[in-house]
């Protein structure tokens, strides 16, 4: 069975065609600048030269058509679209309606639309991707895989904000959590790879990328997660502040004569390690600046790791224990210093010990703790596309 995975942004479309026998990527690519001058598609087939198409893409339907043409044409990997069984779509926000991935129908699209308010940057684009596929390959099954469903198993004590209950009743304001596909995939892989108890294993996943979040799960089911109503809450990120006192918003708005929307834009796009240092949102740039003695770069890295450790501590308490901690995403998979310092500076009380030789690795599944460490620590590369494809396959069979 071959599954196409699509992840639509407002002006971009990422795709992967995965052969589920062997879970192999047959082709992948990216359409950029959809609806903007200078649109371009890059189509990649393993061991072949990249195929680049520079042509107008006024909307997502045109982009989807180009993707299907590329998959079936001269640079293609299938003879016809009939070989593609179904399409899995990443959808950011499913509100509190969806507790699982689901085959798309009119009702599902209606709910995705109702959640535009909760995911204003992503949900409209995700829906455009689905509707484009319905138009270009009618009759093909589309599956929506939500970033929020992993958080749907959170208990009430974890998902309620301590604000007037009427806002939950009226607007479903609660903690949802994001990167759900990644957390679900990595927690399950940690259990599988680590040979842990599939029902009872207490796992903390640190998804540390440009966007960053942490989850606690028992037997692969989330009990807590650091992002909230939106991806703003929790860890310090590339450009997002993570947790701040809400009064900061009022203070900046009043003193800088800005609207709430403008301040939220600052917290989402101009804060995090970028805001703290004024240098970059890329952790590699911050590390170089710190090595060259930039004080705020040192502080930002320290604060980032400290916040990660505080959440780990909180989640150990939330689960009354932890069997394994897994690091994933750009920083988690590549930055051995962060993995080492988080463990050595803050987790020795748990008996957690990093093995420096095992930790000297990038982007590979590996146990990185010592044999006598009381908590197993792993590097588990995330693979959101594969997780989406697996769900799509399950719902198609
Ligand atoms: P996202 O999907 O949220 O955009 P990624 O998971 O791709 O993010 O992670 C991107 C981040 O990973 C960037 O900030 C980048 O600096 C960081 N990163 C990649 N390699 C390294 C490295 N060797 N050391 C530190 N950070 C790294």
Image (spheres, rainbow, N blue to C red):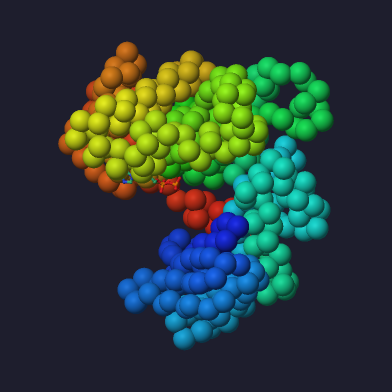
Q: Residue furthest bottom?
A: 74
Is 173 on the left-hand or right-hand side of 83?
A: right
> Residue 55, image x and y in percent?
53, 78
> Residue 290, image x and y in percent?
24, 33
Residue 305 visible within the image? no
Quarter holding residue 393: bottom right
Q: Quadrant of ligand 1?
A: top left
Vertical relation: 395 (above or below) 372: below
Q: Quadrant of the N terminus?
A: bottom right
Is 177 on the left-hand or right-hand side of 173?
A: left
Task: Identify the residue at image location x=68%, y=22%.
Answer: 160
Task: Identify the residue at image location x=41%, y=77%.
Answer: 51
> Residue 29, image x and y in percent?
46, 67
Which residue is more in the foreground, 130 or 357?
130
Is 65 on the left-hand or right-hand side of 52?
A: right
Vertical relation: 22 (above or below) 63: above
Task: Identify the residue at image location x=66%, y=50%.
Answer: 123
Residue 258 visible within the image? yes
Q: Residue furthest top?
A: 349
Is 116 on the left-hand or right-hand side of 28?
A: right
Task: Identify the residue at image location x=50%, y=72%.
Answer: 38
Quarter holding residue 63: bottom right
> Residue 175, image x and y in percent?
64, 29
Q: Quadrant of the C terminus?
A: bottom right
Vertical relation: 137 (above or below) 231: below
């Amino acid at each position: 069975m071959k599954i196409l995975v699509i992840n639509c942004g407002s002006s971009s479309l990422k795709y992967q065609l995965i052969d589920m026998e062997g879970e192999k990527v047959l082709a992948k690519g990216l359409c950029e600048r959809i609806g903007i001058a200078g649109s371009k598609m890059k189509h990649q087939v393993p061991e072949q030269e990249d195929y680049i198409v520079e042509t107008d893409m006024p909307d997502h339907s045109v982009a989807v058509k180009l993707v299907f043409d590329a998959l079936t044409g001269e640079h293609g990997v299938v003879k016809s679209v009939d070989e593609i069984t179904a399409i899995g779509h990443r959808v950011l926000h499913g509100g509190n309606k969806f507790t699982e991935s689901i085959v798309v129908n009119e009702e599902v699209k209606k709910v995705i639309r109702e959640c535009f308010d909760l995911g204003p940057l992503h949900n409209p684009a995700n829906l455009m991707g689905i509707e484009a596929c319905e138009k270009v390959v009618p009759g093909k099954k589309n599956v929506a895989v939500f970033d929020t469903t992993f958080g749907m198993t959170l208990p009430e004590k974890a998902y309620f904000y301590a604000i007037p209950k009427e806002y939950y009743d009226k607007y479903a304001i609660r903690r949802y959590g994001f990167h759900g596909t990644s957390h679900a995939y990595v927690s399950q892989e940690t259990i599988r790879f680590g040979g842990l108890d599939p029902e009872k294993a207490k796992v903390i996943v640190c998804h540390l990328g440009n966007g960053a979040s942490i989850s606690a799960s028992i037997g692969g089911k989330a009990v807590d997660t650091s992002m909230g109503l939106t991806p703003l809450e929790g860890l310090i990120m590339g450009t997002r502040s993570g947790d701040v006192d809400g009064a900061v918003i009022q203070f900046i708005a009043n003193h800088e004569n800005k609207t709430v929307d403008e301040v939220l834009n600052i917290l989402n796009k101009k804060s995090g390690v970028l805001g703290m240092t004024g240098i970059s949102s890329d952790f590699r740039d911050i590390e170089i600046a710190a090595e060259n003695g930039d004080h705020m770069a040192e502080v930002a890295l320290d604060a980032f790791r400290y916040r990660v450790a505080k959440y780990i501590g909180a989640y150990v308490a939330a689960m009354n224990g932890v069997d394994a901690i897994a690091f994933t995403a750009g920083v988690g998979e590549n930055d051995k210093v962060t993995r080492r310092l988080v463990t050595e500076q803050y987790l020795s009380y748990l008996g957690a010990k990093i093995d420096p030789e095992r930790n000297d690795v990038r982007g590979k599944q590996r146990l990185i703790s010592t044999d006598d460490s009381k908590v197993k620590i792993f590097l588990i590369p995330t693979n959101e596309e594969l997780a989406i494809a697996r769900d799509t396959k399950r719902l198609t069979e």
